[in-house]
Amino acid sequence: MVTQTDLNQTDTDWKPLHLFNIYRFTVATVFLGSFLAGLSPSFLGRFDEHLFVVAGWFYSSFVILCEVTIRKRWPPFYVQVLGQVLIDIFTISLLMHASGGVNSGLGMLLVIAVAGGSLLTEGRTAFFFAAVASLCVLIHVTFADIYDWFGQTSYTHAGMLGITFFATAFSAFSLAQRVRASEMLAKQRGEHLRYLAQLNAEIVQRIDTGIIVVDTMQRIRLFNEAARRLLGLDQHPEAVTLAYVAPELVEQLKRWQNTLSSTPSLFRPALGEVEVMVTFTGLNQGGATSTLMVLEDATLMARRAEQLKLASLGRLTASIAHEIRNPLAAISQAGQLLAESTGLSSAQARLSEIVVNNSQRVNTIIENVLRLSRREPTNLQSVELHSWLQSFVEELINLHGLIKTDVFIQTPPTPVNIIFDPVQLYQVITNLCDNGLRYSQGTPLLEMTIGVGERPYLDIRDHGPGMSEEVKTQIFEPFFTTETRGSGLGLYLSRELCAANQSSLHVFSNNHSGCCFRIHFASDT
């Protein structure tokens, strides 16, 4: 019957049995080969040569058969150990008898057989092997004395061998217990280490910060999901160098290796959607130095810093705006009344017009500031982007007096569903289109492209002169504007609304032929 213990045997159990069988094969072939070649010591087979040869052939054949059963792992492990050691004891006893009995010295081979069996088994089986070996020796000596096979008795020698068998069994049994305890402890620790490694790998893969580890040859050893997303890769790189995945990052790494600066570096991946901030740390293991790279979304960090900065200013600006509205209303009303007065010169009429217009502009700024401070929660809904955009463009054309060819829409063949508050989406797209129409000079005036990458996106491109790098770096800052009549809150508010709707807004391209803004949406799939 096969026990659960037999089923749980591993390579660490079968390998010692295989090595023990190699020892058997060596003993059998050396004894038989040297005897048949006439090179063996004179005591081998001196009592019964024919029995020695038969026992030698039997032992050699048995060892070969054992090798086959060990490789097939059938019968079960402990059945094989028990049967093989008992055959060892029986065969060695025959070889000992054929060579002149206990005095031939071959009885010491029984000690090795008992020791091997004791190491390979558990419990009281070790002492069973010692008892069988002792009985074989004692029975052999008894029959040798009764039938006077060798002319002298060896009861003392047999007794010493018996004691040696039991001492060997006890020592081997104790050693085997310690070895198994050590193996069990090592196995438990190994499983615990594998669990910790699996846990660490899972944590590294799930954190929002990108993690990359490269060796001295810049080969990637660790690469988590966040790093793949930040670098804009379609799949995890395997067995490749860092230069193949992100050549921009290689330049940052070389610069850090030259300076060893702890200051984070900023770069824009060729395939990524956002700017990335990278921090380098050296890892020394066994004399080999690897490099840990921590990647973070720079726009997200900037947004967090900006939100912290504006959070304290929000309450202040809201209270100031409330206080300004009352005197501003009085100024505006006084300007309007002054403009309606009779007898005003053209210069005075112009001054009253300036007062009214700028009062309205200041009031618009105050309304935008108050809207930011009391922004309502988003009402996220599923929006089919293509049909929504077509309705928006029709309204835009009517509002600005455009023709249909002034706005071009490019869409994928399959519908694209996004998650966004429709009211806030209208406000964002309106701001971007108004900016584009203000500067665009080509045909069409605006190009809108719906695409699907890692996330759905919408590109809004104009055909104007583009922006300078200085303007590009400040374009999303509140109250920054290049227009005398602008409030400087349109793009800032658009980006904030996108963030509130789990989306992102950034400048995708900017050159002398125009500027393109891209919105990445949360997908409704």
Image: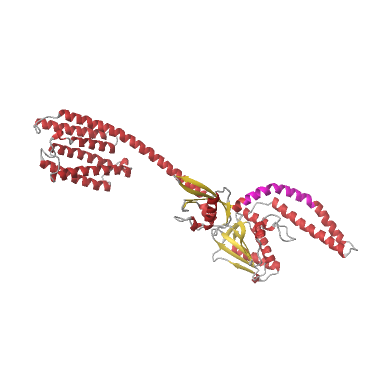
Given the current orientation, which residue lies at the most extreme right position? 343
Residue nearer the viewer, 376 or 444: 444
Q: Quadrant of residue 474?
A: bottom right
Quadrant where the C terminus sits is bottom right
The magenta-colored residue range is: 302-325
In this rendering, the answer to whether 403 lies above or below 142 is below
Whether residue 10 is visible: no
Residue found at x 56% / y 62%: 416
Q: x%, y% of residue 403? A: 67, 71
Q: x%, y% of residue 96? A: 15, 37
Whether residue 243 is visible: yes
Q: Is residue 306 in the magenta section?
A: yes
Residue found at x 21% / y 47%: 64
Q: x%, y% of residue 69? A: 25, 46
Q: Quadrant of residue 286?
A: top left
In this rendering, the answer to whether 508 lies above or below 55 is below
Q: x%, y% of residue 332? A: 82, 57
